[in-house]
């Protein structure tokens, strides 16, 4: 299978240590024996920290996004370091480069591309671009809930949702640098228009990636309609 895996920055770099980079590198290496893998990594707290500095300097949203993008690329570079020879050792800065580099038959790791969206959108556009069979979004919660699980104890996990219903759900959510909410609109638009099979699951346990690849029913499935 050809898969695009988005790993939230808040998963990879919770503390400034190598633990999650190593854990994901081991799993990705083993999955890459039978699958073609593209990874998109997020910025996490380091991105938000840098964005708050650039805002304090009086820069606008697009410049703040640009700083966020640089940080996602640093995280991508860290994952490349963990993957070593199994990955193509250059971070693509756009989708064309990602496709070009994939000709070498190794794992591709990238971060952000352009201002005004999150790495969720990058992963969805990349999945379209390379015609992926599956898009896997690994985030800090078990999937999509009917309300914020960090705020409401009775939040219910949604096992399956159509792209259209998800679009309704996320309408009007925040779109400022560093604060793109749970899943951004661009991502869901790509999923809808290209009927991308998508799973959102908890990335705090890297083994969940293996479970999804084995067809286990975890997280939230987005079905196109
Ligand atoms: P992320 O997509 O990682 O956002 O990019 P996030 O909200 O921090 O998500 P987690 O914590 O990794 O899961 C960090 C910031 O970089 C900018 C945005 O400002 C985003 O909030 N960015 C990223 C872009 O402007 N364009 C991109 O393609 C990617």
Image: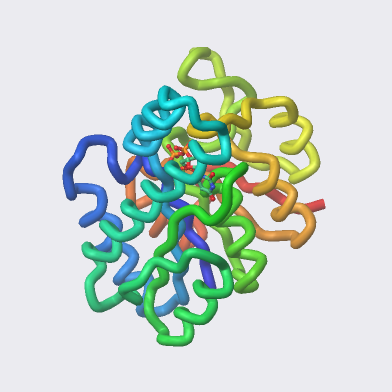
Q: Let me know if residue 140 appears in the view.
A: yes
| Left or right placement of residue 209 versus residue 64 in this view | left
Residue at image x 75%, y 60%? Answer: 195
Horizontal and vertical percent position of residue 105: 41, 84
Horizontal and vertical percent position of residue 97: 51, 74
Name above or below for residue 189 compared with residue 182: below
Counting the numbered discs, the total is 0
Q: Which residue is more in the foreground, 215 or 130?
A: 130
Name above or below for residue 223 compared with residue 166: below
Determine which quarter of the picture holds residue 160.
top right
Q: Which residue is more in the foreground, 219 or 133?
A: 133
Name above or below for residue 113 compared with residue 205: below
| Left or right placement of residue 62 versus residue 191 in this view | left
Q: Which residue is more in the foreground, 210 or 204?
A: 204
Horizontal and vertical percent position of residue 5: 47, 58
Horizontal and vertical percent position of residue 220: 58, 42
Residue at image x 40%, y 43%? Answer: 43
């Amino acid at each position: 299978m050809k898969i695009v895996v988005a790993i939230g920055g808040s998963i990879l770099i919770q503390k400034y240590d190598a633990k999650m980079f190593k854990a994901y590198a081991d799993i990705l290496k083993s999955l890459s024996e039978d699958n073609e893998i593209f990874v998109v990594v997020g910025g996490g707290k380091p991105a938000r920290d840098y964005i708050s500095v650039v805002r304090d300097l009086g820069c606008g949203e697009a410049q703040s996004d640009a700083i966020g993008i640089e940080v996602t690329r640093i995280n991508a570079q860290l994952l490349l370091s963990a993957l070593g020879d199994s990955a193509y050792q250059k971070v693509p800065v756009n989708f064309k480069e990602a496709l070009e580099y994939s000709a070498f038959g190794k794992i591709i790791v990238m971060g952000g591309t352009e201002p005004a969206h999150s790495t969720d959108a990058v992963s969805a556009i990349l999945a379209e671009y390379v015609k992926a069979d599956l898009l896997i979004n690994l985030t800090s919660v078990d999937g999509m809930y009917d309300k914020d699980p960090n705020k409401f104890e009775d939040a219910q996990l949604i096992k399956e949702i159509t792209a259209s219903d998800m679009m309704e759900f996320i309408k009007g959510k925040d779109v400022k640098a560093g604060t793109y909410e749970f899943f951004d609109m661009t991502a869901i638009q790509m999923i809808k228009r290209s009927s991308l099979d998508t799973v959102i699951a908890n990335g705090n346990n890297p083994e969940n990636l293996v479970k999804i690849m084995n067809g286990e029913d975890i997280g939230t499935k987005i079905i196109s309609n």
